[in-house]
Image (cartoon, coloured by chain):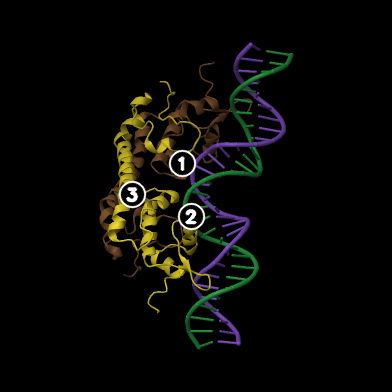
Chain colours: A brown, B yellow, C green, D purple
Amino acid sequence: MVVSDGLAIGALAQRTGLAVSAIRYYEAQGLISPWRNAGGQRRYQRADIRRLSFVMIAQQFGLTLPEIRDVLSGLPGNRTPTPKDWQKISKGLRAHLDQRIDTLTRLRDNLDGCIGCGCLSLPKCALYNPDDRAKSNGSGPRYLMGDSPEA
Amino acid sequence: MVVSDGLAIGALAQRTGLAVSAIRYYEAQGLISPWRNAGGQRRYQRADIRRLSFVMIAQQFGLTLPEIRDVLSGLPGNRTPTPKDWQKISKGLRAHLDQRIDTLTRLRDNLDGCIGCGCLSLPKCALYNPDDRAKSNGSGPRYLMGDSPEA
DNA sequence: GTAATTTCTAAACCTAACTTTAGGTCAAGG
DNA sequence: CCTTGACCTAAAGTTAGGTTTAGAAATTAC
């Protein structure tokens, strides 16, 4: 009976290093779904430790919580995820990460030249329209390196 | 006389693609210092186009506005920055960027193995304690991959 | 059985980086 | 001159990702 009543939120917090408040917040964002015991307290599976670890890793990769929720939806709902399940959804992360690294590397390789070179031709500039900028929710496009759009 | 009265904020906004409100915000944060004309309106130098471009680039690299302000303080105050001046302060950016790329690359190279491998030994895990996490302002350390701190 | 923890909810608060709003002033064109 | 559009300030609002607070109920420890 004591064997598996599930973890209390405090125990899960200790195991993951997350704050209790953060775990409750993640639940509100649909990232994790504990059940409740007779007294109404949250109880978690041991697999949820790994689930939260995944959340933390994905955050480091720059994914937002809604994006992470979508990725996690690729896990089976009816059983405890296997290592294979985890590897499968990790592929998506890997692609995301590859893209970020590519973008940063491209920026780096052109940094010295582009900042000081006097190049004012936007379409030629390696810093023009990087991926990250495209999805920024600001208003309108952003141009870099100081020339007008049509130059 | 018409030659150089300086740019109005709207013109600078058009040249950089930034919102007028963002440019005023950057001024409040000490990133740019226009002068005022007789009527109290902001006027900018042409070199400020490049200055704001630099701000946008540095932001993409993950620097905060206070950090960017500090980097920009390396520019000469008494004259228009030369390409050499820009290249000099770009070196700092380059170091920052190198570090980010290294971290991401390290994470990527261990992702597949670490997510699914069943490794629960924290000190061995490549995802343990990445640089970014260390400076996060949350409360206390964060552990990854689901084991207790002392394991 | 009682005291100390832990957990519960809801709502308010926090930082970064901006935008929006409100009410008023400046500048340019006809 | 007068209108229109650009500009001004100050303050409040916004989003993401949480934390803090307050008061109450459950659980655990002795």
Could you tell me how far apart the alpha carbons at marks 1 and 3 are, in whole angstroms?
A: 33 Å
Q: Position of residue B95 (x, y in %)?
A: 31, 45
**Badge 2 amino acid:** Gln
**Badge 1 amino acid:** Arg
Left or right, B140 with reference to B50: right
Of A24 and B10, nearer the camera is B10
Above-or-below relation of A146 to B104: below
Mark 3 Cα within 10 Å, few/some/many (few <14, many 20+)? many
Can residue B45 be seen here? The reply is yes
Can residue B119 be seen here? The reply is no
Above-or-below relation of C21 to B121: below
Q: Do residues under tags 1 and 3 come within 8 Å of each other at their CB atoms? A: no
Above-or-below relation of C20 to D19: below
Q: Quadrant of residue B98?
A: top left
Of A12 and A123, nearer the camera is A123
For the N terminus of chain A, give its image quadrant. Answer: top right
Labels 3, 2: one chain = yes
User: Which residue is label 2 attached to?
Assistant: B29
Q: Position of residue B55 (x, y in %)?
A: 39, 56
**Badge 3 amino acid:** Leu
User: Which residue is label 1 attached to?
Assistant: A69
Could you tell me how far apart the alpha carbons at marks 3 and 2 are, in whole angstroms?
A: 19 Å
Q: N-terminal of the two: label 3 or label 2?
A: 2
Residue name at image x 56 percent, y 30 percent: A35
Residue name at image x 32 percent, y 48 percent: B92
